[in-house]
Amino acid sequence: MENHKACSILFKIKGMIAVVTSCINPKTMSSITRSFFSLEERELQTIQTLKRLKAVGFKQIILADNSYDYDYSKLNDAIENVNIIHLKQYQFANKSINEVLILLSVLDYIPPDTKIFKISGRYFPTDNFKLELNETIDFKIKGFDFSSRRSVVSTRGYFVKDKTVYEEFLLSCLNEIYSYPYRIVGLRSLWIFIKEFFKPSLKTTSFISIEFAAARVLKKGHFKYELTDYLNIEGQIAGLQSKEFIQE
């Protein structure tokens, strides 16, 4: 792990901190295309994210990036007063695992009792964005079909009470990602569980997303959360076939 701006020094100022997760220059995985965006477009999106976070009032920003190789000086003035943490990670087929590991890695750089706004690098706050989180709430999130069994949470942006709450939540999500495929819901899943118990197999892929895992963790009732219709962020989804602009 590399930190390009005083990695051993925590931010001293109390207040809300923005944590931006990104992969500006992903490693090429054989013939698999993982994003419709070019490197230049990813750079511009990251610059837009950082500049907009500063414009809406964030004084403390961490950019946590797991690019295979990248020269961060290309971001020029956008990275001024931004704590850049470069994490060289193994790239899992399920990118949700990388997302959780990135966020767990940056917890040491966040001071205690500090509210957190997590945002993905290709998205940015709108003019209506507010740095607000109720003191009695652990999370402020946007959910989809939250009353259903297939509910998900938008991880493009959300608010967290502090790093202690965040660590417990992230570890719970990681456990959910790995344990969900082994849940027992019938005779077939029971038989799979028994076989795995006596002869464990090494599974390197998991198809449970962080969005789905986070919803399950929150709905188990340990955390206090507030659902919101609008986080007031926007950006382009990194789809394989198109560039869809969304607002949340």
Image (cartoon, rainbow, N blue to C red):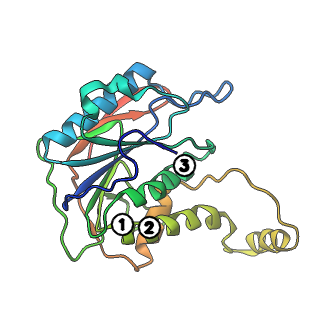
Q: Which residue is mark 2?
A: 167
Indicate whether 130 appears above or below 188. Answer: above
Considering the numbered disc 2 on the image, is that residue within a helix, a strand or a loop?
Answer: helix
Judged left or right of residue 198, residue 59 is left
Q: Secondary structure at mark 3?
A: helix
Spot occupied by residue 119 in the image (x, y as percentages of width and height): 33, 47
Residue that numbered label 3 is attached to: 98
Marks 1 and 3 in Cβ contact (< 8 Å): no
Mark 2 is surrounded, within 10 Å at the Cα level, by few (under 14), some (14 to 19) or many (20 or more) other residues, namely some
* Quarter residue 201 falls in: bottom right
Check contact, mark 3 vs mark 2: CB within 8 A. Answer: no
Q: Position of residue 156 (x, y in %)?
A: 36, 48
Residue 30 location (% of width, % of height): 69, 26
| Residue type, label 2 | Glu
**On screen, 176 above or below 46?**
below
Task: Please give the name of the residue rendered at 56% of the width and 52% of the height, measured from the top-left corner.
Answer: 97
- Residue 214 in percent (x, y) is at 45, 63
Instruction: Answer few, some or many: residues within 10 Å of disc 3's Cα (few below 14, many 20 plus, some between 14 and 19).
Output: some
- Considering depth in this image, is 231 or 191 the residue closer to the camera? 231
Where 95 falls versus 170 (above or below)? above
Going from N to C along the chain, the mark reached first, 3 or 2, is 3
Taking the spot 50% from the left edge, 55% from the top edge, the residue there is 100
The label nearer to you, 1 versus 3, is 1
Would you place residue 144 above or below residue 22 in this image? Answer: below
Q: Residue at x 32, y 26 (%)?
A: 75
The CA span between labels 3 and 2 is: 15 Å
> What residue do we see at 19% from left, 58% from top?
13
Q: Are marks 2 and 1 in contact (CB under 8 Å)?
A: yes
Looking at the picture, which amino acid does disc 1 mark? Lys
> Which residue corresponds to mark 1?
163
Q: Amino acid at mark 3?
A: Asn
| Residue 164, image quadrant | bottom left
